[in-house]
Amino acid sequence: SRLYRNMREKLSLLNSKLAESVNGMSIIQQFRQEKRLQKEFDETNMDYYKLRYAMVKTNSILLSPVIDFLYTFSLIMILGFFGYESLNGPVSVGVIYAFTSYARNFFNPMTSMMDSLSIFQDGIVSSSRVLDVLDNEEYTPQQNETAEAKIQDAKIEFRNVSFSYDGKHTVLNNISFTAFPGQTVALVGHTGSGKSSIINVMMRFYEFNEGEILIDDIPIKNYRIDELRKKMGLVLQDSFLFYGTIKDNIRLKDPSITDFQIEEAARFVQADTFIEKLPNQYDSKVIERGASYSTGQKQLISFASTIVTDPKILILDEATANIDTETEALIQEGLKKMRKGRTTLAIAHRLSTIRDADLILVLDHGKIVERGTHDQLIQQNGIYFDMYQLQNNGIH
């Protein structure tokens, strides 16, 4: 078992190194790390080879050969016993044949079992590694059993919400704010201040520890997960495209979305400006992770896939961070149209993109330290003012 477990661990490490090297090929080439990574791979591969060889050697010594030895030894004992008996009188050939057959029939199942034992042992070790993952006690947040509420106006309210990923270190501490229907609430702050954690608990990716999150004055746990997913649109900073076509990535396996809706959504977020220039337009091929498209183009497709479902709540996790200035100017108008009539939570690092927000929350170490509109926060001459001045000075 120990040998198999070590071999499996080395195999996992080997696969991980291979996947990392393929995905990070450009970085490896850029920093000229080919030889070092090849050396590391060879070392891991050799460790795996040695353990695999040791496993084969163990099987060859301890499994079938041991049974064959015992079977041969039993034949020697039987023939020796009847040979000794033959000195005192005749021994029937049938009796000798019967006893040798008994020995063979006794050891045959053991031989078969030993032949399968290596496969069985491999399965035991592999399944134990899978069960280690399945035994993880971090469960998906559960909604109330009677959850049947529907999102209508999309008013969002946080009441004294506290949250911790590990149960020890609090990342959100007594967060309270209200986003009224149609308003845009922006979240700003330094890295690690808790911006993304607010989105995570809002989307029910994690269970919050204390407080209450309300939508339309109804606790969020009283909504079914499919209702939340249907009425919330999330645009992440790092967009991900699946293998297929542009049309497939905007539709995302929802057969109820028509081609006309896809084209309208693309036009709405200004994605049609580059899609319609492609040879196959919306049927253009998308390879793994969308490698054939620029970061800005992938983000525009991500915008279209979000807006095509017509969500009532829009959540933007620094949606324009990876878009060049020219493309950003194009989609800012699209973002304004996306936010119109929708309640929006937006994480922003570029403060210029959220100047028109109805409410800006400045977070620091999991707490809201400042709140107000852009003009109000500038007049306070606090953290937001310093961040704004820093960005403007950097621009000039």
Image (spheres, helix red, strand yellow):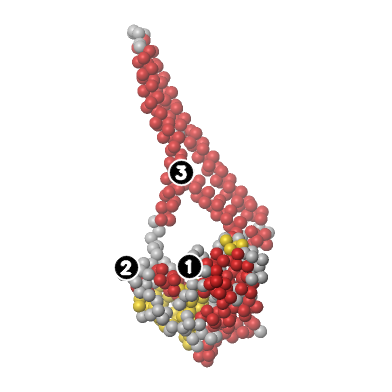
Q: Is disc 3 surrounded by few (<14), some (14 to 19) or many (20+) residues within 10 Å?
A: some
Farthest-out residue, left:
146
Q: Earlier in the sequence, mark 3 or mark 1?
A: 3
Residue type indicated by callout 3: Asp
Give the labeled residue for mark 2: 145
Residue closer to the observer: 332 or 124: 332
Residue 340 in picture, x, y percent from top left: 50, 82
Residue 198: x %, y % from top left: 45, 75
Rounded to the nearest angstrom, the CA distance separating label 3 from label 2 is 41 Å
Q: Residue at x 55, y 66 (%)?
A: 249
Q: Earlier in the sequence, mark 3 or mark 2?
A: 3
Query: In which image quadrant can residue 366 be found?
Result: bottom left
* Residue at the image point whose x is 39% and y is 63% from the top: 139
Q: Secondary structure at mark 1?
A: loop
Q: Quadrant of the N terminus?
A: top left
Q: Secondary structure at mark 2?
A: loop
Whether pointer 2 and pointer 1 mark residues with C-beta atoms closer than 8 Å, the reply is no
Residue 357: horizontal and vertical position, in percent? 51, 85
Identity of the amino acid at label 1? Answer: Ser
Residue labelled with disc 3? 122
Residue 114 at x, y percent in the picture: 43, 34
Q: Residue at x 52, y 69 (%)?
A: 258
Q: Quadrant of the C terminus?
A: bottom right
- Can residue 64 be seen from the camera position used here? yes
Relative height, residue 95 to residue 172 (above, below): above
Q: Amino acid at mark 2?
A: Glu
Look at discs 2 and 1 and give the one toward the viewer.
1
Using a 10 Å C-alpha cutoff, classify the residue at mark 1 as few (fewer than 14 neighbours), some (14 to 19) or many (20 or more). few
Q: Are marks 3 and 1 in contact (CB under 8 Å)?
A: no
From the viewer's perspective, is 167 left or right of 387?
Answer: left
- Residue hosting label 1: 256
